[in-house]
Structures are given as structure tokens and as C-alpha cells.
Image (cartoon, rainbow, N blue to C red):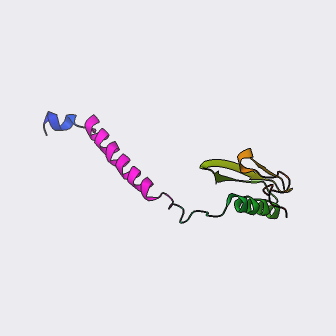
Amino acid sequence: MSNAMRARGGATLIELIVTIAIIAVIAGTAGLAMRPAPASGRDDRSPDARVAALRGAALARATPLSDTVAVDGRLVTVTAFPDGRVVADSALHVDQLSGRAPHDAR
């Protein structure tokens, strides 16, 4: 056996870098393959209907719930509390105690 063969005991830096690069590509591909599927459909209900549904769910579950509602191209965060209160941006025009729009006479 020659001296050159006995001196080679480990891996070179290039071999390590190539191995790490291959593992990174495999991990990245696997990560992309495991992403959740996008939502199948949009919620086409009116903002008032979405707020009413959120308020009803908060009352039923006895826990505060939040959601975002699109109003005139802006996203507005709405929070419904288990006591029936609804807190939202003023752009949504929601009565804080009833969760209804001011024009809603019910």
C-alpha cells in the first residue's frame, strides 16, 4: 500500500459542501411538497353577514374570535366577544353592542 492511499482518511471540504447542497435541495423540495393546499373558495358573504356569523360563533363557543373582512378594498380586523360585543374599525360601521350595521333596524 502506498503512502498516498494511507494519507487519505476523511472527506474533503468540496465533498462535504456538495453533500450538504444535495441535502438542502432535497429538504427544500420536500418542504414545498408538504405545503397546505390553498383555500378552495372565498367567503362571498357581505361584511355584515360575516360579522353576524362571527358574533354568533363567539356567543356559541363562549370565546373571543377574530376575523378579517374586506371593506372597500381594505382589510379590517373584527373581534367578537362572548358577551355579544363586536369591536371593529370605524370603516365597517358596526354597532359595538349588537354587531349590526346602524341601518339594520332589527
Asked whether, in this view, residue 11 is left or right of residue 57, the answer is left
Q: What's the magenta region? A: 9-38
8 vs 90, left or right, is: left
Residue 67 location (% of width, % of height): 68, 54
Q: Residue furthest left?
A: 2
Give the answer, above or below, for where 28 lies relative to 38.
Answer: above
Task: Name the residue at 70% across, 60% down.
Answer: 50
Task: Name the residue nearer the viewer: 88 or 63.
Answer: 88
Callout count: 0
Where is residue 32? Give x, y as percent. Answer: 43, 54
The one nearer the camera, 28 or 6, is 28
Q: Quadrant of the C terminus?
A: bottom right
Q: Is residue 7 left or right of residue 72?
A: left
- The image position of residue 13, as x and y in percent, is 28, 35
Q: Is residue 74 left or right of residue 5?
A: right
* Residue 11 falls inside the magenta stretch: yes
Quadrant in the picture for the N terminus: top left
Measuring 37% from the left and 46% from the top, which residue is drawn there? 24
Can I make out residue 30 in this image?
yes
Main secondary-structure element of the magenta-colored stretch: helix
Q: Is residue 89 visible?
A: no
Q: Is residue 17 magenta?
A: yes
Would you place residue 42 above or below residue 95 in this image?
below
Q: Position of residue 84 (x, y in %)?
A: 84, 57
The residue located at (38%, 54%) in the rendering is 29
